[in-house]
Image (cartoon, grey):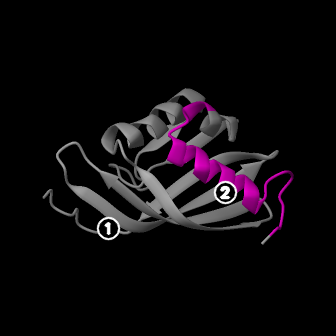
């Protein structure tokens, strides 16, 4: 699909996903609006754990790689419609204790002025795979 919201396109989401897989925080933050929000897949609140503002979002993004040093988001399918978009991927990662997570997930985006204003992440609640 090639629908656009300002300068946001499916290619924009593909590039954002590639930055996640490179673990490239500077590239990731270049996609984010100045007053961005990130709602993580888990946390104590209704929206998971929320990170509000650029510095908090940066910390939240980096926490994913600290928790899963080999984190990867694979098999992406993306769409953009107006000021909203979705990326569906398979998340794979290994925690420091050796347990592995592999589950399908989606990110729901809100765009503003060609950037990501909100990244809201959801992941299937699949039990970790034991360390071997």
Is 100 one of the magenta-colored residues?
no
Total labels drawn:
2
Report, in whole angstroms, how far the alpha carbon at label 2 lies from the one at label 1.
Answer: 24 Å
Asked if one can make out residue 53 in the rendered structure from this viewpoint, the answer is no
Residue drawn at x 86%, y 52% as measured from the top left? 6
Is 16 one of the magenta-colored residues?
yes
Residue assigned mark 1: 125
Image mark for residue 14? 2
Residue furthest to the left in view is 132
Q: Is residue 19 above or below residue 34?
A: below
Mark 2 closeness class: few <14, some 14–19, many ≥20 residues within 10 Å = some
Q: Which stretch is magenta?
A: 2-26
Q: Secondary structure at mark 1?
A: loop
Residue furthest to the right in view is 6
Quadrant of res 129: bottom left
Quadrant of res 115: top right
Q: Secondary structure at mark 2?
A: helix
Image mark for residue 22? none
Residue 29 x/y as whole percent = 63, 35
Q: Is residue 65 above or below residue 88?
A: above
Give the dominant element type of the magenta stretch: helix, strand or loop. helix
Would residue 113 be found to the left or right of residue 45 on screen? right
Q: Earlier in the sequence, mark 2 or mark 1?
A: 2
Residue furthest to the bottom in view is 1
Mark 1 closeness class: few <14, some 14–19, many ≥20 residues within 10 Å = few
Could you say which is closer to the camera, residue 63 or residue 130? 130
């Amino acid at each position: 699909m090639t629908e656009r919201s300002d300068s946001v396109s499916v290619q924009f989401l593909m590039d954002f996903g590639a930055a996640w897989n490179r673990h490239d925080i500077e590239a990731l933050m270049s996609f984010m609006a100045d007053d961005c929000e990130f709602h993580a897949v888990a946390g104590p609140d209704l929206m998971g754990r929320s990170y509000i503002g650029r510095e908090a979002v940066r910390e939240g993004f980096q926490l994913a790689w600290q928790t899963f040093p080999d984190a990867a988001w694979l098999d992406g399918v993306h769409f953009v419609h107006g000021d909203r978009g979705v990326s569906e991927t398979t998340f794979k990662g290994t925690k420091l204790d050796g347990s592995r997570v592999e589950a399908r997930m989606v990110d729901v985006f809100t765009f503003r002025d060609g950037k990501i204003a909100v990244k809201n992440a959801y992941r299937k609640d699949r039990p970790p795979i034991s360390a071997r």
